């Protein structure tokens, strides 16, 4: 976002769903993705755009808003935050941040198709936003990973860079950050989906050159000033997988931690084919994920960039025994997940 001029649709979506610097417990509470989905469906049925909610609302719209299953008084209070919106967007712009909404052309279609009503209405970010729609390999793993796991992570990231294949990461300590920096050091591109603290991370010196070069995008569905928390970190997993073409688990605990939960969620929803490292002495979670349908992957397969690219492209949507997957499934309505709503998402 090089300026703080937003489309009218995006302004409305920010007013309805953005935190805009207010206390998390303050009234009115911003809409959740599912709540916004309900409002957006109502707008679509009325042949309205989000921008039609700007300015004074006539009696028919106010009456009809009850059909969105959201309290009209709450919606009106959210829409009245224009002053707060102008201030916060100017602050973001001064920090080099941008924002995309579901109505913007640059919003990744993968999130719309795969997440449906759980697609985040807003994406905040810094860097080259076009990378969000370019796919790639999600490289994930535990924060506490052994030297062998780090070595394989570096090899994978290097081969991705050589193949022109993006690394997609959650930016956490351990496998995530090792994959990011290894890919960037080899001239590759990286998409990093943060669970919080975007405003702070975006001005960090360690990312400055990659952001300037257009090799990195930092993105988050959470407010730029939101602090890291476990809930956001667990929610972030699906966003990483759903921007990718494939996933690779370097190391995972068994039935605990974000890596396990994210891999399980991906296997259940069949978003992308999942590779799981099967070298000697990998954690027990790796073996269990393979039993659940993850495809075996080992260091011996990392011979050269061309072979690596062929390996990835040779695997389709393969899944095994899902009965062992005990992590609670995310509430995604399969009938909606593949839909691309016309008016409010900017889809055709």
Image: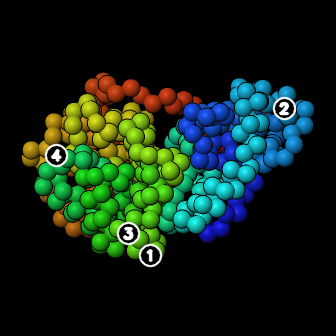
Q: Which residue is the site of mark 1?
A: 213
- Kindly indicate the quadrant of the structure image that contains residue 44: top right
Q: Which residue is the site of mark 3?
A: 205
Category of crowding for the residue at label 3, using alpha-carbon neighbours closer than 10 angstroms: few (below 14), some (14–19), many (at least 20)? few
Give the mark, 3 or 4, whose residue is nearer the N terminus: 3
Secondary structure at badge 4 equals loop
Count of all numbered marks drawn on residues in the image: 4
In depth, the one of 97 and 282 nearer the eye is 97
Give the mark, 4 or 2, whose residue is nearer the N terminus: 2
In depth, the one of 222 and 293 nearer the eye is 222
Residue 252, x across and y down, in percent: 23, 41
- Kindly indicate the quadrant of the structure image that contains residue 155: bottom left
- Name the front one of labels 2 and 3: 3
Q: Which residue is the site of mark 4?
A: 278
Q: Which residue is the site of mark 2?
A: 62
Residue 299, x across and y down, in percent: 16, 56
What separation in Å lies between label 4 and label 2 (alpha carbons)?
Answer: 58 Å
What separation in Å lies between label 1 and label 2 (alpha carbons)?
Answer: 47 Å
Residue 303: in sight, yes or no? yes
**Residue at point 29% right, 72% down?**
186
């Amino acid at each position: 976002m090089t300026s703080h001029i937003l489309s009218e649709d995006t302004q409305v979506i920010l007013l309805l769903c953005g935190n805009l610097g207010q206390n998390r417990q303050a009234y009115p509470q911003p809409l959740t993705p599912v709540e916004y989905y309900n409002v957006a469906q109502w707008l679509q049925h009325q042949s309205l755009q989000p921008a039609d909610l700007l300015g004074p609302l006539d009696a028919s719209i106010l009456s009809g808003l009850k059909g969105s299953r959201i309290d009209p008084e709450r919606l009106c209070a959210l829409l009245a935050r224009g002053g707060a919106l102008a201030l916060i967007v100017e602050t973001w712009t001064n920090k080099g941040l941008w924002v995309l909404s579901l109505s913007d052309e640059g919003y990744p279609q993968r999130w719309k198709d795969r997440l449906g009503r759980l697609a985040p209405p807003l994406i905040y970010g810094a860097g080259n936003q076009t990378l969000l729609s370019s796919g790639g390999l999600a490289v994930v793993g535990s924060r506490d990973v052994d030297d062998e796991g780090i070595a394989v992570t570096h090899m994978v990231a290097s081969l991705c860079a050589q193949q022109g294949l993006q690394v997609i990461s959650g930016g956490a300590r351990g496998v995530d950050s090792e994959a990011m920096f290894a890919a960037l050091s080899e001239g590759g591109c990286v998409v990093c989906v943060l669970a919080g603290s975007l405003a702070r991370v975006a001005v960090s010196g360690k990312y400055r050159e990659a952001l300037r070069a257009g090799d990195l995008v930092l993105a988050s569905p959470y407010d730029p000033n939101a602090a890291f928390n476990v809930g956001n970190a667990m929610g972030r997993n699906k966003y990483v997988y759903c921007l990718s073409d494939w996933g690779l688990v370097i190391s995972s605990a068994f039935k605990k931690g974000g890596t396990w939960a994210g891999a399980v969620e991906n296997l259940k929803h069949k978003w992308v084919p999942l590779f799981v490292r099967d070298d000697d002495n990998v954690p027990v979670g790796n073996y269990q994920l393979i039993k659940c349908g993850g495809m075996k992957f080992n260091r011996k397969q990392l011979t050269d960039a061309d072979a690596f690219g062929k390996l990835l492209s040779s695997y389709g949507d393969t899944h095994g025994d899902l009965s062992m997957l005990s992590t609670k499934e995310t509430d995604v309505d399969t009938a909606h997940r593949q839909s691309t709503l016309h008016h409010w998402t900017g889809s055709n």
